[in-house]
Structures are given as C-alpha cells and as structure tokens.
Image (tube, grey):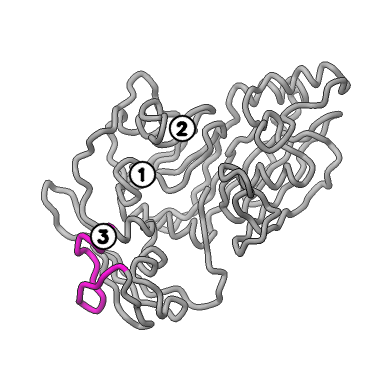
Amino acid sequence: MSESHDGSNNPAPETTTAPTPAEGGAEATEHSVTVDPPRDGARLDMAVAALVPGVSRSAAQRLIEQGEVRVDGRKRPQGYRVVAGATLLVRIPAPPPRTGLVPQTGSELDILYEDDLVLAVAKRPGTVVHPGAGHQSGTLVNQLIASGRTFSIIGGEDRPGLVHRLDKDTSGVILLAKSDAAHAALAAQFKDRTIRKAYLAIVLGAHLPDRGVFRSSFGRRPGDRKQFTGRVASEREAVTEYEVLMRSSLCALVVARPRTGRTHQIRVHLAEGGHPIVGDHIYGRAYPRPGSQPEAEVAALKLIQRHALHAWGIRFVHPADGRWIEVIAPPPRDFRTVLDAVFGETWRETLSHVLIDG
C-alpha cells in the first residue's frame, strides 16, 4: 500500500486530460495542470509527481529528460522552481511494445470484476505482485501479460495496470487499470483517500475493544530498513480503523479499514497494539505461546502458514461514469480452513453483514 495526501484545505489543482494520436494505433495522453499555491517554489519534477495522478517522481524525471514536460510552453530542467499559477503540460507517450516480461501460462486469473477500463482480481497468497529482485517470473504481472489484455503503462513497463499493491503473503482483491486515463483517475482516488478498503485479519488475543482506531506517525524501523513502525518520529501519519467481528479463546477475527496506505500499516498497527496477526513472523510471535489452551485452537491457528491478512473488499468510483463500484474477494482456502476450525460455520453469516466502509 502506498498513498499520500498533504491534508490541506487548499482547492485541488486545475487538471485536464486529453488523448493525442500516436503511432501504432495506441494513444498518448496529455495532462494540463495549474501549479497550486502549496507547490509554489517546488522543483519541477516534484510538482509533476504531485499534480499528475499516477506519475511517480522517477517517472516525472524521465518525462522531463525526454522533453515531454512544458512549463508555460517552455522546456525546463528537473530542478527548475515552478511558481503558483504556471501551467504544466505533461505528455505521457503511448506504451511501447513490452519486452522482458514473460507470460505465465497455466495460471488463470481469478476475476472478481471487469469492464473496458477496470479489472479487479483476487491475488492468491504467496504471489508476488510485480517482477523484482529474485522474482522475474511467477508474479501477478506475468499472469496479466499471459491474459492478453491491454493495461495502463503509466506506472512503468514492468507494472502494467498496477494502481496499488499487496504484500506477497496477503491475499485478496487488487485493482488494475486498462488505460492510462483510468489509471490516473484511480490513482487520484487513492491519493485523495476516497477509495475505501476493508481487510480481514485473524489476530492473537481476544481481549481488544469492540472498535477502535490506531493513529500514529509511521516510518522505517531504525536498524532494519525492511521493517516499519508507528513508534518513530515522522511527519507521515498512519490511520487504521478496526472492528472485532468474532472472538474465541486465543484469537479474534477483525475487519481493518486503513484510512492511509502505508507499507505494512495494518500488520504494524495490530502488532504494536498488542494483537499481532496470526502467522506474522515479522511483526509478532506468529502463534500462541507454548502451553496455550485449548490445544485444539492452537493447532487450528497453525494451519495457516503465512500472515492471516486478506484484502476482503474495495469500493471506488468508476473512472468513466462516476458509479460507486464495490468488489468483494471471498477468503481463500487456507484462511477459510482456520475460520472453520476456530469459529465453525457462524463466521460466514457474520461476514455477510459487514460493510466495506463500516
């Protein structure tokens, strides 16, 4: 998860988007944005990344170097300081033919929702979202390429369609864009925090309040850059709302609704709140302590060999017509097995009454 927002009350910058002809039948997109007061004096690359949805700072730097960015009609370097009221014209070229991404055949996508602009799939636990160090194949992106569909390329050639991500061992719904315009519209919703998400988590310990909110600063853990913590001085805020759905002797089933999108946010907040997610060896003790009773429940919790976190639902505004779309991903087999063993059949009825937005 990776979202940000400046939290100010300033009006949103004026933005227009239009397609432009490109070779090979594809279309480039042009974004005309007006520099707003908070960005007065900012570097050009940072202003482009902040004002054009779906464009990272590295992508902005690449576009500037390629001559695809104009400030009031003129090319400027990455470090140029923009002024409020200036017009930035950003042209995003049509995606080139993909190279280097290997289709993964024999693995069908688990499609939850699809139309001409948006695809939502259920990511299986253990699946890496996109290629990276040590994972050049077998990722969700490799499955997407094999499907033959066309996806946005605004986030990078190796991340077609990806508007957000899930950890390798987190299962559940993930949203994908089929065009750069759809990508920009969805990315804007993530940035403005209007998209709503709900996760199911099985946590250790049953004695947490029925409802609550974790609110903290958020950053990398000193001494281990791969881990995160809410106990660090940082200007970055993380907010997670939660609700207990069911309790047993040793654990609870909760629905977590992140209002920000920091990496590992839900796992960190629950662990540092005293209730780590079952199976999470990074941020908690993973399973009940030796000698915990009842033994049958201890054995049931050990049936899941990854952190018991599932992206259950997402709610967003459709980029074409403004309709609210809700997508639900039923828990996968390993998650269901634990729920059945601990809570019996009653969890299904309980879950049927849960809302994505609370």
Q: Name the residue under label 3.
A: 63
Secondary structure state at the residue bearing disc 1: loop
Q: Nearer the viewer, residue 65 or 145?
A: 65
Q: Do the residues labelled 1 and 2 touch (CB within 8 Å)?
A: no
Secondary structure state at the residue bearing disc 3: helix
For marks 1 and 2, give the CA distance.
15 Å
Where does the image place residue 93, in percent across and percent down from the top left? 21, 55
Q: Give the range drawn in magenta.
A: 62-78
**Height in image: 162 above or below 329?**
below
Q: Residue at x 31, y 74 (%)?
A: 80
Q: Would you say residue 68 sits in the magenta stretch?
A: yes
Image-quadrant location for residue 77: bottom left
Image-quadrant location for residue 170: top right
Q: Residue at x 38, y 59 (%)?
A: 57
Q: Nearer the viewer, mark 1 or mark 2?
A: 2
Q: Which amino acid does label 3 sit on?
A: Leu
Q: Which amino acid does label 1 sit on?
A: Gly
Earlier-in-chain disc, 1 versus 2:
2
- Give residue 161's mark: 1
Left or right: where 307 falls relative to 89: right
**Height in image: 7 above or below 134?**
below
**Height in image: 302 above or below 276?**
above
Left or right: where 32 falls relative to 292: left
Q: What residue type is labelled 2?
A: Val
Earlier-in-chain disc, 2 versus 3:
3
Image-quadrant location for residue 91: bottom left
Q: Residue at x 72, y 48 (%)?
A: 242
Q: Mark 2 points at which residue?
A: 128
